[in-house]
Image (spheres, rainbow, N blue to C red):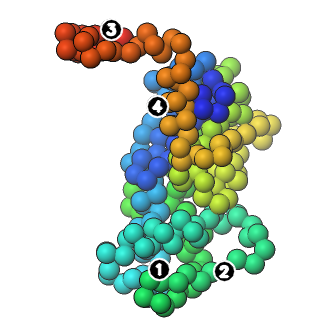
């Protein structure tokens, strides 16, 4: 969150295999609000491949996973996404042939909102945010719904912020404002935030030198991080 210039809010981070949500207040994460679920972009890819197999593409061929991942990264979007002009749905395969991508480009992202599609019982991304915000003090909740930061590669899927906004609004009072923020490069948001942290003066007090580690090891680690 520091990478965006904010110190408080709700963070949803969704990567290849993990999706997590937590609350940050004045630069410190509230540990009792942290939730991590084992699903992400890899599940979208696998479901996309399943949908393509139903049309006769890549049938029973697990070696095509990386190829399907590239196709997903180019075409994946949510159902609410409005196409910008005329977009080609043709993907040229390495062997010179081509396939036409249909509704699976939109249906594959449904797994983030309905994990039962892939046989998992985890909370979808909208419920993760809703539950974590509602686990905080009641006076914080309105502010937290208005400061939701999206991070990780999956949050750059076309139409995802709008779809997530819609699903969250279904769960709360219509008078509560929901605002989602996506940095320019959400995939690298954590790295940018880490760079900001290590540049702060107070962080120098947390450094552990090689000499300190060689002498006290775990003891010095606990003293400087707890």
Residue on which disc 1 sits: 52
Mark 4 or 3: the one toward you: 3
Q: Position of residue 216 (x, y in %)?
A: 21, 9
Name the residue at 43% across, 53% down. 16
Query: From the viewer's perspective, is 151 left or right of 96?
Result: right
Query: Is the residue marked by circle 1 packed among few (<14), some (14-19), or many (20+) residues within 10 Å?
Result: many
Alpha-carbon distance for marks 4 and 1?
A: 35 Å
Residue on which disc 4 sits: 34
Q: Which quadrant of the structure image shows residue 116?
A: bottom left
Alpha-carbon distance for marks 2 and 3?
A: 57 Å
Whether residue 99 is visible, yes or no, is: yes
Of 129 and 4, nearer the camera is: 4
Please tell me which of labels 4 and 1 falls first in the chain: 4
Please tell me which of labels 1 and 3 falls first in the chain: 1
Label ID, residue 223: 3
**Secondary structure beneath disc 3?**
helix
Mark 1 or 3: the one toward you: 3
Alpha-carbon distance for marks 4 and 2?
A: 41 Å
Label ID, residue 86: none
Residue that extends furthest to the left in the rendered view of this protein: 215
Alpha-carbon distance for marks 1 and 2?
A: 17 Å
Verify CB contact (< 8 Å) between mark 2 and mark 3: no
């Amino acid at each position: 969150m520091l990478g965006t210039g904010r110190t408080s809010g709700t963070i949803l981070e969704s990567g290849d295999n993990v999706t997590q949500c937590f609350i940050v207040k004045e630069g410190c994460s509230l540990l009792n609000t942290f939730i991590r679920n084992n699903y992400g972009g890899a599940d979208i890819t696998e479901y996309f491949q399943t949908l393509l197999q139903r049309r006769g593409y890549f049938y029973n061929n697990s070696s095509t996973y990386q190829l399907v991942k590239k196709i997903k990264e180019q075409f994946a979007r949510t159902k609410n996404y409005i196409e910008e002009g005329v977009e080609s749905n043709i993907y040229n395969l390495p062997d010179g042939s081509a396939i036409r991508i249909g509704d699976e480009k939109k249906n594959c992202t449904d797994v983030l909102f309905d994990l039962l599609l892939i046989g998992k019982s985890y909370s979808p991304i909208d419920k993760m945010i809703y539950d974590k915000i509602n686990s905080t003090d009641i006076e914080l909740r309105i502010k937290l719904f208005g400061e939701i930061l999206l991070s990780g590669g999956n949050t750059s899927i076309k139409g995802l912020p709008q779809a997530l906004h819609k699903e969250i609004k279904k769960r709360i009072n219509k008078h509560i404002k929901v605002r989602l923020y996506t940095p320019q490069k959400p995939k690298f948001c954590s790295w940018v935030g880490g760079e900001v942290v290590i540049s702060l003066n107070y962080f120098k007090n947390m450094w552990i030198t090689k000499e300190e580690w060689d002498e006290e090891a775990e003891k010095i680690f606990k003293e400087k991080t707890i």
